[in-house]
Image (cartoon, rainbow, N blue to C red):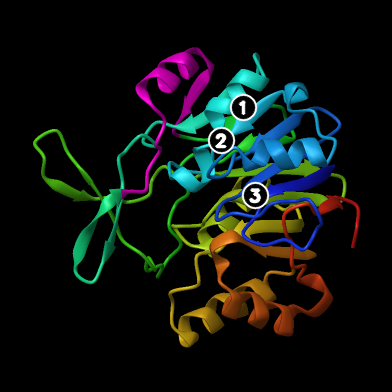
Amino acid sequence: MRYQFLVENKTDHEGILAEHGLSIYIETEEKTILFDAGASDVFSLNADRMDIDLSRVDLAVVSHGHYDHTQGFPLFCRINRRAPIYLHKNAFRRSHGFRDGKIEEEMCGIRWSDEAKNAMEDRIRFTDGSVWITDRIAITGTVPCAEGFLPSEQFYYYNLDGHPVEDDMSHEQCLVIREEKGITIFSGCSHRGVISALNAGKALFPGEKVAALIAGMHLYEVDAKTRAAVIDELAEADIERVLPVHCTGMNAICELKARLGCCCVIAQAGDSFDGCEG
């Protein structure tokens, strides 16, 4: 397996752009996969500069229904005319963040135009429970919350009566790929907790070693005690490689690197990794 970061919050690669978002191009022996598509057309610009042909993608997986993971998909569907897009059934909630005791005006959910959404309709495969693409590639569907998990951020959407309803982030899902060395888990933002994402991936392949966890961990707003508790659990999970990306936050990334050493890899847009690397 090989995975390449088309979009990430940071980069120092010449000619590669960074933005607040995530998009990963994944090649396995069986399938070529696009995991998320960032917040704009940057994923496509970077793909061109990395000599990646997006028309070869066999399927796309949407981690959850927020704009910074989905806004590139209308362009993707113009570049690639065949790949199905696996999206959770609750992903079209028009979510808003919650700050300073009030619901934010700006919508942070999927921002596709009606025209773009209609054009993509026959490509979308709605998920809920787990979906098996092959016997080695699976999508978790809704990630169950780990015991004791408390969200670091709240979101709300408006129901048909116009009343605000807290978004339980049930549309967050992970991609899990099994190879000889173990499983690799991809999580977009881990709004239900990175430990929840880890557990959900392991549940699909019981007894398998976790070779890699590539995840936005949404730890940038949590306090030091909470970060330390999460890092402790990750350290005890015996994961060969941890890549904290996107919304993890620099404090958490630095603390993970200090705790895990060479097992923690700080990735950026333009980076490429082989699944067999240590």
Which disc, if any, is residue 76? Answer: 1
Image coordinates for residue 202, horizontal then vertical, percent: 64, 52
Q: Residues within 10 Å of mark 2 (few under 14, many from 20)?
A: many
Quadrant of image for the N terminus? top right
Residue type highlighted by circle 3: Phe
Q: Any magenta on residue 116?
A: yes
- Magenta span: 107-128
Left or right of 8 on screen, residue 192? left
Image coordinates for residue 188, horizontal then vertical, percent: 56, 51
Closer to viewer: mark 1 or mark 3: 1
Q: Nearer the viewer, residue 139 or 76?
A: 76
SS category of the residue bearing label 2 = loop
CA gap between label 3 and label 2 equals 18 Å
Tag 2–tag 1 contact (CB < 8 Å): yes
Tag 1–tag 3 contact (CB < 8 Å): no
Residue type highlighted by circle 2: Gly
Q: Nearer the viewer, residue 54 or 42?
A: 42
Residue type highlighted by circle 1: Phe
Q: Which residue is mark 2?
A: 72
Image coordinates for residue 102, horizontal then vertical, percent: 18, 64
CA gap between label 2 and label 1 equals 6 Å
Q: Which residue is mark 3?
A: 186
